[in-house]
Every structure is written in structure tokens, then in C-alpha cells.
Image: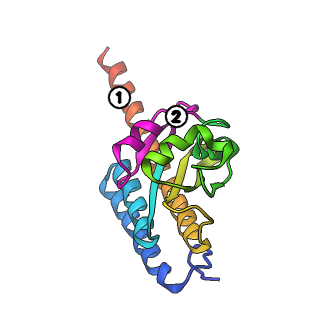
Amino acid sequence: MNPVMGLHASPAWVEPLLKGQGRLLERLAAGASLTEILEDLCLLVEAHCPLKKCAVLLVEGGDHFRIGGAPTLPEIFRTGVDGSGLGPGTTPCGLAARLRQEVTVQDIQTDPDWAHAAPLAQALALHGVVSIPILGGADQVLGTFALYQRLPGAFPEEELELVRACVGMASIAIRHHQRQDQDQRAIEARLRVEDR
């Protein structure tokens, strides 16, 4: 086992992960937007996973998603997924968020359980998807990190390990930005009170 984040990945994966972690921390400290950080994580995964696409979906209002980052997926993906619900009968990401567990579909275009999602998958020429929930404190679901592939079938374990490591980094970034937003709202509320 590799000592870095408990990964079983080959040594070629360790350096990009360490650099990605370092960039994430630097970008957080420099005040980068959450979208920029999440898109960087997607690009990190895509650079090491041939023919794959990534998206990070953020849970909003406890019942639907908004796009957090999907730098290489087209606008049709954004409009098809942004605002989608959580739970069974939605999308693999919606189910992963509701169950708080990894969901893998080897071919969303032909799996009868996902017939309602097949038209979007066909329009995007995507077959397989693995969606991993991004958890915060107290088992709160912050979003999902999805890896899509153009061919049906299982995902290589090395790719899944990379995505799982990026899920942890995404959780750190999301929680950091949530705390910043809470602090900013508290400051604004105090200023309003003082102005009265």
C-alpha cells in the first residue's frame, strides 16, 4: 500500500496527487473560487484517466444539485443536470447522494433501471458512470464527484482510487468555502444591526 492517502495506486499516481493537494491548499489560501478548485480537481482526474469526463455536483437546498465543476462537459450536460433532484429515480449522482454511498452504472444507455437518464447519456455519448458522495461533517452530503466513460464496462480500480482521493480534497474545499460564506453573512448581519 502506498503511504500517501492509503492508496494502492502505482507510483505514477502519487506525484500528481501530492501536487494536486498542494495546489488545492495554495488556491484555498489565495482565495480561489470554489468552481475553480473543483474544476482543477476534475482536470486532475481527467489528465490521468483516458477517455473519461468528470463533474462535481453540489447539493443545494438539501434536495437538488447545482454544477460545482464540469470543465470539459458540454452545455447540454449542465442544463440536463443542474437542478436535478436527489434520490431514486433521478440520476446515479442523485442516488449516490441519497444513499451516501458509491453508485456505479456500467452502461447508463442500456440499463433499464436508468432508462429515464439514457437520453442525456446518449446525447453526450457517455456509457458508464461512477458517482461518489462528497461528505462533510456529521455525515452531511455536500455533493457528488462523478466519473463518466465513453465505453460501457467496469472502471479500473486505479482510476476509482484517484477519484476517491479527489473526493476528500473536494470535501475540504467545499467546507472551507461554506465556512467563508457563513462568516461573510455573519459580518453583514452585524453591520446591518450596527447601522440601525
Could you tell me which secondary element the residue under label 2 belongs to? Answer: loop
Instruction: Please check the rendered image and state whether residue 31 is part of the magenta-colored stretch, yes or no.
Output: no
Q: Which residues fall within the magenta stretch?
A: 58-85
Mark nearer the viewer, 2 or 1? 2
Q: At label 1, which amino acid type do we have?
A: Glu
Q: Give coordinates of residue 127: x percent, y percent.
A: 54, 55
**Residue that carries the numbered disc 2 in the rendered image:** 84
**Where is residue 187, by image quadrant?**
top left
Residue behind mark 1: 188
Between 50 and 32, the one nearer to me in the picture? 50
Q: From what the image shows, is residue 175 above or below residue 12?
A: above
Q: CA distance from mark 2 to mark 1?
A: 31 Å
Is residue 138 in view from this perspective? no
Quadrant occupied by the N terminus: bottom right
Q: Residue furthest top?
A: 196
Q: Quadrant of residue 85?
A: top right
